[in-house]
Image (cartoon, rainbow, N blue to C red):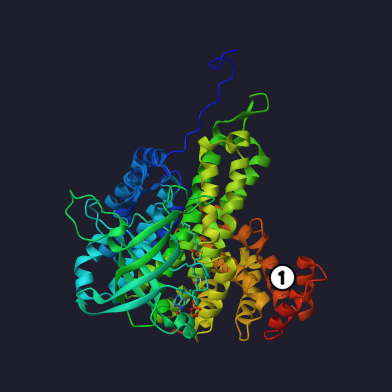
Amino acid sequence: MRAEEGFQPTPYVEGNPFTADTVLPSLLKRLVPPSVLSEVDEDLQRFGDVVLTKLRPLSARAEPARLVQYNQWGQRVDDLQTSEGWRGLKAALQEEGMIGIFYERKYKEYSRVYGFAKILLAVGDTQVMFCPLSMTDGCSRVLELMGTPELKRDVIPRLTSRDPNIAFTAGQWMTERPGGSDVSQTETIATPIPNITSPYGPTYTINGFKWFSSATDSDVALALARTGPVSAGSRGLSLFLIPLRRPLFRGPEESAPPALTNNIRIHRLKNKIGTKVLPTAELELNGSEAYLIGPLNQGVKSITPVLNITRMYSAISSVGYIRKALTIATAYSKARTVSSGEQLLKDNPLHVSVLAKVNLLYRALTHFTFSAVALLGKVECGVASEEEELRLRMLTPAAKAFAAHYSSIAMEECMAALGGMGYMEETGIGRLIDDGLVEKVWEGTVSVLSLDIVRATSKRGVVEAFLKWANGVLSACPPPLQTKLSSPISVIRESLPLISAAYKAPVSPLATRPALFLFSHATSSLNLLEHATWSFATQSTSVEVDIEVFRRWVEEGAWGGGLATAAEELKRGLEATIERVAADSKIVYGTEDEAKDAVVELARAHL
Ligand code: MFK
């Protein structure tokens, strides 16, 4: 039989990612006022078509970057060659106003929601272009907050430009060989250059080795380097803006010189599990010129706007990868025949129940992430209350970690929903899974971020701000809905004191991870309740679905169980004893290992 003969599978059709989405259009109606919504809605429909007709074909032409270190004369050239597809994606997204939307602020505090809606639609079809764009966004914010007037005049317009001929992207270099999350042993040294003043800030030379520089094709990078004694740990680090190439400003017709022009050598490209198109490198800095940003020896604090913005991008990327995989799986179920060709997959209750579970998770994570995005917009526009600002500090690491934790299992279910077809590279789900895994690591693992929430809640008023908001959402639920949803609402009520107890000092070390999960599950449940309440009040056609989604998310959750299960996990963490820590060590290392003594000693200090 020839391939053209016999059964021919019907290709699935994904459709416009905005209009086909089950969550975003109605979420935007709740978050954005009508005057903004009419414009934003129209643009997102248009952008949905751009994703299909422009970004997706460019993404298909994106290839891993190549590094040519030496030319035929044996001279060091460090020629970083990126693919046409990668460069095309970058240009297309810059033209679409990624990053411009966030700094033009045409829609004031709603600009973040609008721009992140575009990211949600595009992220599955743009390789990992939002990694460099996230750092560009973070760099713009740092310069907006701390840059000299000349940096604001010359560099911010480039970072936020819609013209790809002049637009800059930025990298972020913290990670070194002694530590990724722990920057206290940073080896890179910054030395002031005497008698040189730049309008961009006090000028230094930088010497060191950066172990993970993503977006090595960028124009500038924000980097930490040591200006204080080693004994000061991370409190002896300062923040610098480093041009990757000199001169930094060139005419549009001049091609970019190599990083060698600022004494930066690309040691090698990283061999990563995914994100292969993104040029991530190990870099040697051998006397690179740089400008101090913010106060001396407060580099970690100065760079935190970058961390918080990139964490938000990480959260939306995890959610966007799920969106893309779920869209494929849903579209496939409408095209694939089963049962001797008499049924479609979409008519099979068992199959639909699996898709419903992924969809439930997608809804919860989308509402959760956008609740943080909406607050970010308010904070940046100076219209957030102090309580909202405190709440955002807790939400950001939680949304990033929670979304990253669940995204791969959701994508795996979508892959399996296509059977053997899903395991083929052509659907793109495999690449999404490989790329999406990075969200579990970069900008902090779940454990590191659970500790960041402890850092955040050590500030007075943070937990209280969350509790006040949570109680406000519960009491805003109208009586008929309260009655109908009394059971899930009482599960939420019972979880609140537990969250509060988890963050009372001294925080039990085994409680931090389950506390992150309970906090995230409770907050996302409350976001879904907010939506059901809105749906009820506006008599939305989706009100029954919105109510059911809320109920299921609280009572059943996704693969980790419901909110009550998350509460049980936290109780176990809070009640953990030294004996449990010792038993953990024996389970992992056996009974002979002496390491258990160290782990028990460390635990004793906290339990
Ligand atoms: C997308 C494709 C990617 C491609 C592949 C990439 C692979 C990635 C490989 C990696 O690089 S993985 C590791 C990446 N590393 C990180 O993500 C960093 C994670 N570590 C942290 O976030 C640490 O928590 C941090 C470095 C920020 C902590 O350092 P310290 O020195 O212990 O901070 P410290 O002393 O607690 O905080 C200093 C100040 O900053 C404090 O303020 P005060 O001086 O007023 O007391 C903190 O409150 C404040 N701070 C810390 N984190 C903050 C913050 N403020 C606001 N927001 C935050 N997030």
At numbered mark 1, what does the secondary structure look like: helix, strand or loop?
helix
* Amino acid type, label 1: Glu
In the displayed structure, does residue 93 sit left or right of residue 561? left
Residue 19 percent location from the top left of the image: 41, 45
Q: Which of the image's four quarters has the N terminus? A: top right
Residue 407 percent location from the top left of the image: 56, 54
Picture layout, residue 3 above or below residue 68:
above
Of 115 and 591, nearer the camera is 591
| Residue at point 68%, 86% (across, down) | 605
Q: Which of the image's four quarters has the C terminus? A: bottom right
In the rendered image, is residue 323 in sight? yes
Of 489 and 228, nearer the camera is 228
Picture layout, residue 194 above or below residue 333:
below
Q: Residue furthest right?
A: 591
Quarter-of-image position of residue 474: bottom right
User: Number of callouts in the render?
Assistant: 1
In the rendered image, is residue 534 in sight? no
- Label 1 environment density (alpha carbons within 10 Å; few <14, some 14–19, many ≥20): some
In the displayed structure, does residue 230 sit left or right of residue 350? left
Of 436 and 480, nearer the camera is 436
Picture layout, residue 196 above or below residue 558:
below
Residue 171 percent location from the top left of the image: 37, 62
| Residue at point 63%, 79% (across, down) | 502
| Residue at point 65%, 70% (across, down) | 514
| Residue at point 59%, 69% (across, down) | 447
Residue identifier under label 1? 568
